[in-house]
Each structure stands twice: as structure tokens, then as C-alpha cells.
Amino acid sequence: MTGYAIVLASKELSRVQAVSTIASVAAASDVPVEVFATMEGLLPFEKETVESGDFDVGPVGARMLEAEDMDVPLFTEQFAQAKEIGPLKLYACEMAMELMGQDLDDYVDVFDESLGVSGFLNRAQDKQVVFV
Amino acid sequence: MSETELDPDVTIDSRGATCPGPLMDLIGKVKEADPGTVIELQTSDSGSKGDVPEWLDEAGHDLLETVEHDDYWSMYVEIN
């Protein structure tokens, strides 16, 4: 195994945040990580959603957003920071983008490119696949 | 307040940051540090007490001491 290929298919903030936390620490430790945001997993990355903070939250996600006594960087910041220091790549699913009538400009600037299923599978070949 | 005789070369103040903030701050400093460097990581995140040693174990560096203060911990790390 030479790293992780994470399929992110959930819009729930706790899941997205957990993916960014694990991916960021792995990449910072020089473990290669590829994140494929597909289906609902793309939605939290929409600029509009990030700017309004209108995420799909459970109790922990809600506490995270309202916590003033703790400094919790949002997944978008974590991804951006980790990409600068380690082997981390993010891909947006082409099909989900097409279904929603969107392109990469509609999302926060963390994606390396858009990708289809074959492209993702090629990148996942030598990695442990994690589905979230 | 506990005392230590360790005299760190670098001190990282990650107090107030939650997981993985302190660990990420530490990793950043470890990457640019020479062998023998002693780093003090200050963290108020109780999870760091378990998580930092786990990371150090895998990365091959030593945790010299963890000192408890009133509202944070100082973790002393030596780079190998």
C-alpha cells in the first residue's frame, strides 16, 4: 500500500471534516492521498455553501461551527494548507458536476481537476480505498 | 505548574487549536528541523497527548517529556 484513495460521497459536515483531517495529517506525513468528491460529496465545496456556512450538520458538526472557545479550521482551509506541504490531490467527479450543471469555478479552489471513474480508478490502483 | 530541566530550541504555541492543529504545527516544524533539535509543543487539546506520541512513534522521533500546566500541556520532542 502506498497511500489512500478516499471516495467522498457524503455532504454531511462531520464526514467531510473527518476526511480533510485524516487526509491532511497523512499527506503532511508524506503518505500520498487522493480524494475523489462525488455525488453529494461535491455539495459542501460549493462556494455559495462555504460562504454562507449552510452545511448539512449533525450535533458534532453544529458544535464545531458554533465553537468560539476552540479554533477549528474548516475542511476547506485544512485541504488547502495540507496541499502545500504534502502529496494530497483532490478531484471533482465529472458526472456529478454535469448533473448539477456546474463547473470547477463553482467550487472553492481546492480541486486539482475534474475526473471520471476510470481516472479515479487508475489513481486508486496502488492505494487503500476508503469510502466515506 | 510543573517544571522541567529541558531547554527547547524551538517552541510552538498551538494552544487553542483542536485536532489536528497541534499535530500539523509540529509536523511542519519537524520537517525543517535538524537531528538533535528539541521542540516544545504547547497544546490545550487533550487528544494531542495520545496522538502526538503515536505520530512520533511512526515518524521515528522521541517524546522526551510531557509537562502539565494549568490549562495546557508542553510536549518535548527530540528530532532523530
Image (tube, coloured by chain):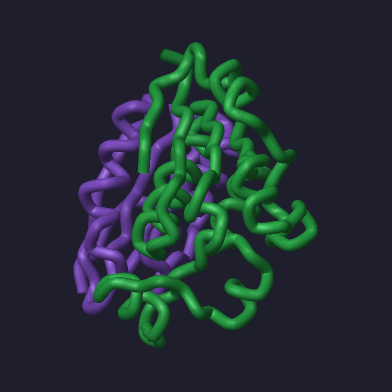
Does the image show residue B36? no
Q: Nearer the viewer, residue A80 or A110?
A: A110
Q: Quadrant of the N terminus of chain A?
A: top left
Looking at the image, residue B73 sits to the left or right of residue A25; the answer is left
**Residue B70 versus residue B24 in the image, above or below:** below
The quarter of the picture where residue B61 lies is top left
Q: Quadrant of the C terminus of chain A?
A: top left
**Chain the render paints green:** A
Q: Position of residue A30 (x, y in %)?
A: 53, 29
Q: Position of residue A109 (x, y in %)?
A: 73, 56
Q: Nearer the viewer, residue B12 or A84?
A: A84
**Chain the render paints purple:** B
Looking at the image, residue A48 sits to the left or right of residue B8; the answer is right
Residue shown at 45%/37% (left/top)? A7
Residue shown at 69%/61% (left/top)? A108
Q: Nearer the viewer, residue B6 or B20?
A: B20
**Residue B29 versus residue B55 in the image, above or below:** below
What residue occupies the far front of the structure in this picture?
A99
Numbered marks: total: 0
Q: Position of residue B79 (x, y in %)?
A: 45, 33
The quarter of the picture where residue A34 lies is top right
Residue shown at 50%/67% (left/top)? A73
Q: Position of residue A77 (x, y in %)?
A: 59, 61
Does the image show residue A108? yes
Looking at the image, residue A32 sits to the left or right of residue B8; the answer is right
